[in-house]
Amino acid sequence: MTSCVDFINTLSPCLVRAGWNADLANLLSLLLGVVIVATVPLLTVILLIWIERKFAARIQDRIGPNRVGPYGLLQSLADALKMLTKEDITPSGADRILFNLAPIITFATVVLIWAIVPFTPLHIGADLSIGILYFVAVGSIGAVKVMIGGWSSNNKYALLGAFRTIALIVSYEVPMILALLVPVLMAGSMGMQDLTRAQGGMWFIVMSPLAAIIFFVANLAETGRSPFDLLEAESELIAGYNIEYSGFKFGMFMAGEFMHVFTVAVLTAVLFLGGWWGPFVDQVPALGFIWLGLKTAVVYLFMLLIRNTVPRFRIDQVMNINWKFMVPLSIVLILLQSFLLRLIDALGLRPAPELANDLLANLPQTLVLLAGNLVLGAIFMHLLQRHGRTLREADEALAVVKGEAAPAGGMAEA
Amino acid sequence: MIELNAQTIAFAILSVLVLGGGLGVVTTRNLVHGALWLVLSLLGVAGYFVLLSAPFLAAVQVLVYIGAIAILIVFAVMLTRSMTSLGEVRNRQWWLSAITVILLFLLLAVGIILPVWGRGAPGEVTSLSATVGGAVELGEALVAGDGFVLPFEVASILLTAAMIGAIVVARDEEDEGA
């Protein structure tokens, strides 16, 4: 274990063996870990902005940034410089302290989540026993920053934007937490490393595709991007809660948003796509970082695809989807999933502990869970279809009534 | 008597957060500021839970009290714009609330002081448990017959009743005809 190949987790034993003071070595390795965990996502964001702009440009039949550096790679750096040199405006009547606090909280809450991301079997910031709950708790602070930012700007559009955002965040937290319970049920733990390890035989997305979809969609809403970008809604609200921010503070909001999307991609990969699992991870743990990176990239690109192709929902549609479809579905899903897991135990389909990472040994229980998920999904889709048909028929009936009434009523109604 | 180690220092910092936040809540004229001071204070309480080796409760504290309740308070305050800066410090019920608060404080103080320093108190100060209280133990204690199943169920009935009440209060009267 304590070879000097890996660092962070195994750095301090190496240094002690090389004759360092144990406390100093511990402090140094901890400090290094914190710096890396806090900086790497931040630097990745610079690249992600470029990827996002290129991706959006291709979908819209443009070329995208191509002037600064090779393939426009340095465009984000130029943008960052531009933001740094812009005037820092504080609106009159703004609450100065809170106004300055909001961007910092935005940033801190996203960076904090990275403390529990398991990069490889050995490397994780802090393997908390309540890892997943920590993510939810830190994420819930995100609502505070929106509130502070929207209120302290002393701008009614910002306040309206903040209200919408909070309504969205608070509502979609419900199905997200319920969906998170499904992996916890299957892994029997809330620790991020335990959750990843439990996916050695089969990824959770196969064992419970519904939970994966609910988690993904709910998180998409939490990031506040299209199709859930009605908090931005240029035509109605101009820009949402961060309308009054300029310069570097706006940059922090923007980077925070990009990082949030990136974080969601990582968490989806960790919780449902097997995290660092991949070929040869047993021999070379550091490979896990690459597998996790690949899976994250797939999820991230999928999110970009959705962002650039799906039109915006209305606020009532967003709330209807959440409260009348996703919340009931996730509650039923938890009941079903716990029942199926009991059934699997009773039938003896659960693989033996030494075969837990074997694909074939995991197949029986996977099939049972997958079948349950598909049946439940089919039932809910059928209900949705029927509901849609009723709505449509009601609309048509209304149109018929109006069509008949129009000549009789004349211009009075208009 | 009191050792100076990392835990003591952390306790001191958290106490400053909790008490300072609490002081901020009652002294500020601005209700939004008051709600945010409350967030700070609650964050300190979450830190206490971490010190007491109860990370689950710490996370729940942040999730429920900051993520839900504090947000709700801020939300309500912001919707009533004229309430954000109050000129008046006292209203007609100030003496009633003062009596309630003093009684509550005395009750809590007695409740804490008696078991620790009163008769029948343990001779030495009990040190903090080193075992981390996990979610499993908590969950079992909540639903076990000899545990806390009755208070747990009573609390859930209370919450359900509150939720139904909120729906009834918020329901649009005109909808009933349709």
Image (spheres, coloured by chain):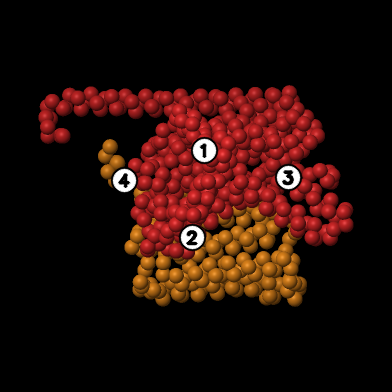
C-alpha gap between disc 1 and disc 2:
34 Å
Quarter of the image with the C terminus of chain A in it: top left
To which chain does the residue with label 1 belong?
A: A
Residue beneath label 2, please? A100
Have a look at marks 4 and 1 and say if they share a chain. Answer: no
Dot in front, 3 or 4: 3
The quarter of the rendered structure image containing the N terminus of chain A is top right
At label 2, which amino acid type do we have?
A: Asn
Q: Secondary structure at mark 3?
A: loop
Q: Residue B126 appears at what percent x and percent y?
A: 74, 67
Give the distance between the C-alpha atoms of the residues marked 2 and 4, in whole angstroms: 39 Å
Q: Which class describes the residues within 10 Å of circle 4: few (<14), some (14-19), or many (20+)?
A: few
Q: Say what secondary structure mark 4 lies in.
A: loop
Q: Position of residue B31 (x, y in %)?
A: 42, 64
Q: Nearer the viewer, residue A88 or A367?
A: A88
Q: Residue at x 61, y 68 (%)?
A: B15
**Mark earlier in primary sequence (3, 2):** 2
In the rendered image, residue A190, in percent from the top left (x then y), is placed at 66, 44
Same subunit: marks 2 and 4:
no
Which color has been applied to chain B in this rendered view?
orange
Reading the image, the residue beneath label 1 is A67
Identify residue for label 4: B172
What colour denotes chain A?
red
Distance between the alpha carbons at the discs numbered 4 and 1: 57 Å
Query: Where is residue A27, by image quadrant?
Result: bottom right
